[in-house]
Image (tube, rainbow, N blue to C red):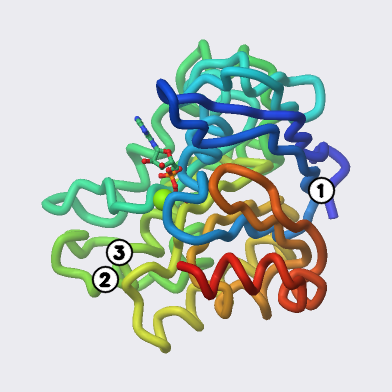
């Protein structure tokens, strides 16, 4: 594990869209180096929570902290600057460009002076002056994409494209990785491969992973801890076994 990864503290966060409370007084803590899943039926507030964590939405009330950084008061580029990366639910890659080119784009702001002065502790590889191309190859190999570096993203299988999206997020050398429905639309084999990659990101790189997922089954073998949302409220928080047997969770899922 790494000593530079603080916990994520979500404290009494509410988000209102007019009369709708998409999040209502939600609190939970993500332990450093853990895989933490946020699950819930459609409309529970999962994507809204992700948008708060990544600076896309402002919390109406409450606060999100990552060590000294108050994420809920920061803009998206500042959040990236403290080492928080997000992979999107809907693939946001440039299909005509190769895997390597897409990863180079993800790497781009590591070279910007503003980003370097933002307080992020760069990983040893970068401090030692390892060239970006070399690091991109390592990240691609890590996600089983080493032989596809020069393939246009648009011709890859869906599962490969989703792993390129994760690889691109890793290119900012994050301490915290946010994954919005990483296995949505995947077949069983692609899902297993993504789950393996997520375990490796945590164990080999020491990165904290927060993932949002609709399907309860997928997170049960993967997550250390699970927070369950329903209609914007936190209805359960615990180990997979604990939340799986929680009557309120069962009720929320049966009703959806
Ligand atoms: P989930 O990702 O769990 O399916 P969302 O966070 O997308 O849930 O949505 C939670 C609630 O907030 C829903 O009722 C949704 O309609 C509402 N909502 C989400 N985003 C907006 C928005 N930008 N404007 C208005 N309502 C929104
Ligand atoms: Mg959603």
The residue at which mark 3 appears reads as 161
Instruction: State yes or no: discs 1 and 2 in contact (Cβ < 8 Å).
Output: no
What whole-number distance in Å separates the C-alpha atoms at marks 1 and 2?
A: 30 Å
Residue 55's place in the image compared with 96, above or below, is above
- Image quadrant in which the N terminus is located: bottom right
What whole-number distance in Å separates the C-alpha atoms at marks 1 and 3?
A: 28 Å
Instruction: State yes or no: discs 1 and 3 in contact (Cβ < 8 Å).
Output: no
Q: Secondary structure at mark 2?
A: helix
The answer to whether 229 appears left or right of 65 in the picture is: left
The residue at which mark 2 appears reads as 158
Residue at the image point whose x is 71% and y is 54% from the top: 235
Of all residues, the one furthest to the bottom in this rendering is: 189
Of all residues, the one furthest to the right in this rendering is: 3
Residue at the image point whose x is 46% and y is 44% from the top: 47
Residue at the image point whose x is 81% and y is 40% from the top: 7
Q: Which mark is residue 155?
A: none
Q: Which badge, 1 or 2, comes first in the chain's sequence?
A: 1
Residue at the image point whose x is 57% and y is 22% from the top: 59
Q: Nearer the viewer, mark 1 or mark 3?
A: 1
Q: Which badge, 1 or 3, comes first in the chain's sequence?
A: 1
Quarter of the image for residue 183 reads bottom left
Q: Residues within 10 Å of mark 1 (few under 14, many from 20)?
A: many
Towards the viewer: 235 or 183: 235
The residue at which mark 1 appears reads as 32
Quarter of the image for residue 39 reads bottom right
The answer to whether 81 appears left or right of 244 in the picture is: left
Q: Residues within 10 Å of mark 2 (few under 14, many from 20)?
A: some
Q: Secondary structure at mark 3?
A: helix
Residue 234 position, x and y percent, is 69, 48
């Amino acid at each position: 594990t790494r000593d530079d990864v603080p916990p994520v503290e979500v404290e009494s966060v509410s988000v209102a869209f007019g009369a709708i409370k998409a999040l209502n007084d939600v609190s939970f803590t993500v332990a450093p180096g853990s895989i933490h899943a946020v699950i819930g039926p459609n409309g529970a507030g999962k994507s809204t929570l992700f948008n708060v964590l990544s600076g896309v939405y402002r919390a109406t009330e409450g606060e999100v902290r990552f060590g000294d950084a108050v994420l809920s008061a920061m803009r998206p580029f500042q959040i990236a600057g403290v080492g928080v990366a997000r992979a999107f639910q809907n693939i946001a890659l440039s299909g005509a460009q190769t895997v390597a080119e897409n990863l180079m784009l993800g790497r781009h702001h590591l070279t910007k002076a503003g980003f370097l002065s933002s307080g992020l502790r760069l990983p040893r590889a970068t401090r030692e002056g390892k060239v970006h191309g070399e690091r991109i190859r390592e990240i691609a190999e890590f996600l089983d994409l080493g032989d596809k570096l020069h393939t246009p993203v648009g011709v890859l299988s869906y599962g490969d494209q989703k792993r390129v999206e994760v690889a691109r997020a890793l290119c900012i050398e994050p301490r915290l990785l946010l994954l919005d429905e990483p296995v949505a639309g995947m077949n069983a084999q692609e899902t297993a491969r993504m789950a393996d990659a997520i375990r490796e990101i945590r164990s080999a790189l020491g990165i904290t992973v927060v993932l949002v997922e609709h399907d309860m089954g997928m997170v049960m073998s993967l997550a250390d801890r699970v927070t369950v949302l329903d209609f914007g409220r936190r209805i359960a928080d615990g180990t997979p076994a604990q939340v799986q047997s929680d009557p309120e969770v069962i009720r929320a899922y049966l009703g959806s």
